[in-house]
């Protein structure tokens, strides 16, 4: 068997099928139950740990400032602002957080479950064209959202995030593989409480990008210094630190890498 055939066994073609979570007309009850599931899964399956580890790297690299302005792109269940808030309280770091998502139902959910976070502002906006000035935020985070986007949108997202970041960018997402797909089907059939989660979870793996695809996506977005690595076997983390005083390069013409 030749290498392309072997690779196809491990790395299936990227799915273009839409997840239920992305549907504008998803019933509110289904959306909320799915987001409840995602909060639990992100906490106990390693996503929170990965975000915090990368976030702390940027914080240390910036000299451990006592005040940070943070942007959470594609906030989803709104668990990242809560996670970073707890981190800041433990370390005496004051955070101002803006969470954005382009789904109206998600925005309504986050506003309802995160009312106690007085330093959190929730904004309905598109991550691929963020409505903020350059270097508005110290750190920009995006967790488990990249796979929801097609190839040109992914490039635009990374460029948009880098443009508004002062200290750096953190992206955490799934890695596509056939093994991870079947693992997701098995695990979510046991631990997921809602049928939308059991459907979307495995599909998310098939929609995810490979490590090489994300590296190329970052290059085309002008993030030449981005470091992309695998983590926990089934996830990837991109960390980008912009050169001091140098804005990100313009988006280059891209071909479909997905």
Image (cartoon, rainbow, N blue to C red):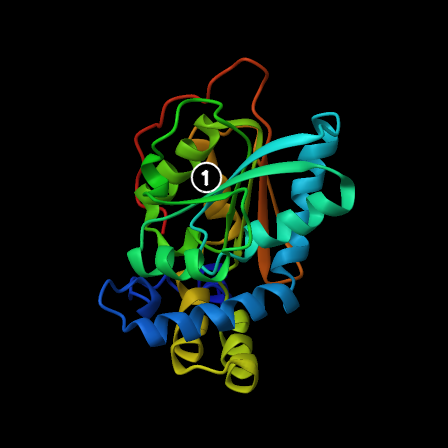
Q: Residue at x 37, y 42 (%)?
A: 127
Q: Find residue 109 and report its image quarter.
A: bottom left
The residue lying furthest to the top in this view is 245
**Is 236 located above or below residue 1 in the figure?**
above
Q: In the displayed structure, does residue 13 sit left or right of residue 247?
A: left
| Coordinates of residue 83 in the picture (x, y in percent) | 63, 53
Question: Where does label 1 land, which residue?
Answer: 216
Q: Residue at x 49, y 54 (%)?
A: 210
Q: In the displayed structure, does residue 85 sit left or right of residue 24?
A: right
Q: In the displayed structure, does residue 238 sit left or right of residue 256?
A: right
Q: Is residue 9 visible?
A: no
Q: Residue at x 46, y 28 (%)?
A: 164
The residue lying furthest to the left in this view is 25
Number of marks in picture: 1
| Coordinates of residue 242 in the picture (x, y in percent) | 56, 24
Q: Is residue 236 visible?
A: yes
The residue lying furthest to the bottom in this view is 190
**Is 30 located above or below residue 123 in the figure?**
below
| Coordinates of residue 199 in the picture (x, y in percent) | 39, 77
Q: Find residue 57 and report its image quarter.
A: top right
Q: As rendered, which of 205 and 114 lies closer to the eye?
A: 114
Q: In the displayed structure, does residue 129 sit left or right of residue 241?
A: left
Task: Tell me if mark 1 has few (under 14), some (14-19) or many (20+) residues whose alpha carbon lies within 10 angstroms of its own.
Answer: some
| Coordinates of residue 253 in the picture (x, y in percent) | 30, 30
**Is 153 located above or below residue 210 in the figure?**
above
Name the element at disc 1: helix
The residue lying furthest to the right in this view is 91
């Amino acid at each position: 068997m030749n290498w392309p055939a072997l690779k196809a066994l491990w790395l299936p073609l990227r799915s273009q099928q839409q997840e239920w979570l992305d549907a504008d007309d998803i019933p509110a009850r289904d959306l909320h139950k799915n987001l409840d599931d995602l909060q639990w899964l992100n906490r106990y399956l390693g996503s929170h740990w990965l975000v915090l580890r990368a976030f702390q790297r940027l914080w240390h690299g910036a000299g451990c400032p006592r005040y940070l302005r943070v942007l959470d792109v594609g906030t989803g269940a709104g668990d990242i602002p809560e996670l970073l808030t707890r981190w800041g309280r433990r370390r005496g770091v004051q955070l101002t957080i803006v969470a954005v998502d382009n789904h109206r139902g998600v925005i309504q959910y986050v506003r309802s479950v995160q009312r106690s976070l007085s330093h959190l502002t929730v904004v309905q906006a598109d991550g691929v064209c963020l409505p903020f000035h350059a270097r508005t935020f110290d750190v920009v985070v995006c967790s488990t959202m990249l796979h929801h986007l097609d190839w040109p949108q992914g490039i635009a997202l990374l460029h948009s995030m880098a443009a508004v970041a002062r200290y750096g960018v953190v992206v955490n997402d799934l890695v596509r593989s056939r093994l991870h797909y079947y693992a997701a089907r098995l695990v979510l059939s046991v631990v997921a409480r809602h049928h939308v989660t059991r459907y979307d979870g495995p599909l998310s793996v098939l929609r995810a990008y490979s490590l090489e695809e994300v590296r190329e996506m970052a290059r085309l977005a002008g993030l030449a210094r981005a470091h992309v690595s695998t983590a926990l076997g089934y996830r990837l983390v991109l960390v980008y630190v912009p050169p001091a005083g140098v804005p990100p390069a313009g988006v280059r013409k891209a071909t479909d890498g997905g």
